[in-house]
Image: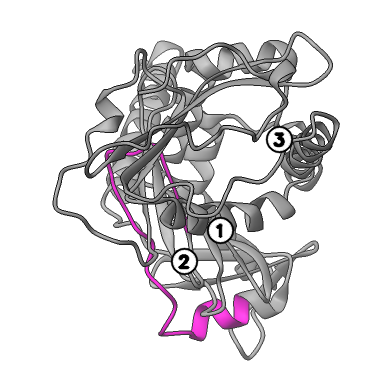
Amino acid sequence: MGRKRKIITGWRLIVLTLCAIAGFNVYDSRVINAAPLRGFYPASTSYVLSSWDFPRAWRSLLRNDAVIRMRKDWPRPYAPLELAARKKTGIRPTPSRWQLWMGKRIVFAESDEGFGITAYPGSLLRWADWVRNFAGAKPGNDGILQLGDTYYAWREGYLIASPARAYVVAAITTTDAPSPNSDNTALLTVQWMGQHPGFFHLRPGAGLPITGEVEFDARDGQRPLTLPQAWPKTPIASVTTRNSEDFAQLWRLASGWFDGSETLSELRHRAETLAKIWNVRALRPEWDTGADHVAIALFDVDTRGGIPLAEAALAMRYAEAAPQTSPFDGVLDASHVLPYEWN
């Protein structure tokens, strides 16, 4: 009597399972990595956050020295988003789980129609959506489906999702929305539109280095801008312009952002209150006459007291001879002025 042979048993099943998982991961990675960074969002979009590799950016931020210091005082800054994601999916969001389901390319956008995302998901989510459609979840006449309180649709292989149906409708039909300013070496890119469009890239490295551009009319000059190399130590942030009016344009632009942030608005309110208490007077007219280079820098913020105190500096370079007296004479009462050397 012949002996019966078991085709799949024990370790063979384990090996086949591991091979299937490895094969799926290789195939899925090729699908995910082959996609360019695209953003499908309404033409009225005002803010865009994008990343070529969002899970990598997520991991890098968690390991960054600046974020580690921040999390000592703010352990879970994204807790509301994490809770919302867990309620919708039943899964605690992590970089690995995000990559498995949503892929690497991601674009978040805010528009008049609402907030939404564009992603290039991996095979697992595509198969899940196919099974859901096979089970009877058919899109409407406009190609939009609904899962809970989230609307979504597909366009050129990309998933577009939003809690606002109008956002998805606009995103799958528009052809004139601004393109995301992509850089595959950056962790994240923040881009904004409007009167002064611009962007900045958040790059890997200690201290969260940032590079970017803002469009606005500024005066050019003959001599190079040299003050950024003159600071005694590396600042947290610095701004360099040709004259004070150029800087004033940037300040007016930043003030619009401050108005939209409760924290920054409160800091500005406190600064204005201190200016009244200290009797800070206005600069005299034409205080910067002759200056062809103005630079400011922020070096540190002392938060040990009740009010954050900034360590900052302003420097000006003159095209010819500097004035005999400081432009800031009389701005503060003598009791609030530290000794300094002019010129």
For the magenta stretch, what is the residue range? 168-191
Decide if residue 23 is in sight here: yes
Disc 3 is placed on an element classified as loop
Q: CA distance from mark 2 to mark 3?
A: 40 Å
Q: Do the residues under discs 2 and 1 have CB atoms within 8 angstroms?
A: yes
Instruction: Please provide percent x and percent y for residue 314.
Output: 46, 31
Decide if residue 4 is in sight here: no
Instruction: Please provide percent x and percent y for residue 313.
Output: 48, 25
In the image shown, does 88 or 51 lie closer to the viewer? 51
Q: Earlier in the sequence, mark 2 or mark 1?
A: 2
Disc 1 is placed on an element classified as helix
Q: Residues within 10 Å of mark 1 (few under 14, many from 20)?
A: some
Q: Quadrant of the C terminus?
A: top left
Against 216, residue 300 (above or below) is above
Q: Amino acid at mark 1?
A: Leu
The answer to whether residue 206 is left or right of residue 62 is left
Disc 2 is placed on an element classified as loop
- Identity of the residue furthest to the bottom in this view: 141
In the image shown, does 53 or 288 lie closer to the viewer? 288
- Residue name at image x 66 percent, y 16 percent: 71
Q: Residue 253, which numbered label? A: 1
- Residue name at image x 80 percent, y 31 percent: 274
Q: Quadrant of residue 266?
A: top right
In the image shown, does 15 or 34 lie closer to the viewer? 34
